[in-house]
Amino acid sequence: MADAKTLDAPAPAAMAPGIHTVAVVGCGLMGSGIAQIAAHAGYATIVYEPSQAFLDKGRGRIEKFLQG
């Protein structure tokens, strides 16, 4: 089982009141996209993916987007 990873992102201009962390189950195309948008919005984002291969691929997509 893959470990949960946290990605840092810039602070958001406005966050939903009371929500500080977003958890996403699955890091395929849809899950990584949801995690990417949440992280980009400034939420602490946790992704759970039992497959290390899918986690690595999804994390690569997310990091590439966040780095520009």
Image: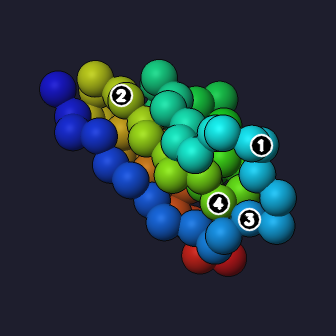
Q: Amino acid at mark 4?
A: Gly
Q: CA distance from mark 4 to mark 2?
A: 21 Å
The reply to whether the C-beta atoms of the residues labelled 3 and 1 are less than 8 Å apart is no
Estimate how packed mark 4 is, as few (under 14), some (14 to 19) or many (20 or more) residues with alpha carbons within 10 Å.
many
Q: Label 3 neighbourhood size at 10 Å, few (<14), some (14-19), many (20+)?
A: few
Taking the view exactly as shown, the residue that stands out farthest to the left is 1
Query: What percent of the width, then of the height, locates residue 23?
Result: 50, 32
Q: Which residue is mark 1?
A: 16
Q: Are marks 4 and 3 in contact (CB under 8 Å)?
A: yes
Q: Is residue 19 above or below residue 67?
A: above
Gap between marks 4 and 3 measured at Cα: 5 Å
How would you rate the neighbour count of disc 2 (Cα within 10 Å): few for under 14, some for 14-19, many for 20 or more?
Answer: many
Q: Secondary structure under badge 3?
A: loop
* Of residues 16 and 7, the one drawn nearer to the viewer in this rendering: 16
- Residue type at mark 1? Ala
Figure check: 30 above or below 32? above
Q: Position of residue 52 (x, y in %)?
A: 25, 35
**Quadrant including the N terminus:** top left
Between residue 58 and residue 4, name the one nearer to us. 4
Precedes in sequence: disc 4 or disc 3: 3
At a point 29% along the width and 40% down the height, the residue shown is: 4
The structure residue drawn at horizontal position 56% and vertical position 37%, both measured from the top left corner, is 22
The residue at which mark 3 appears reads as 12
For mark 4, what is the residue? 42
Numbered badge on residue 49 = 2
* Quarter location, residue 50: top left
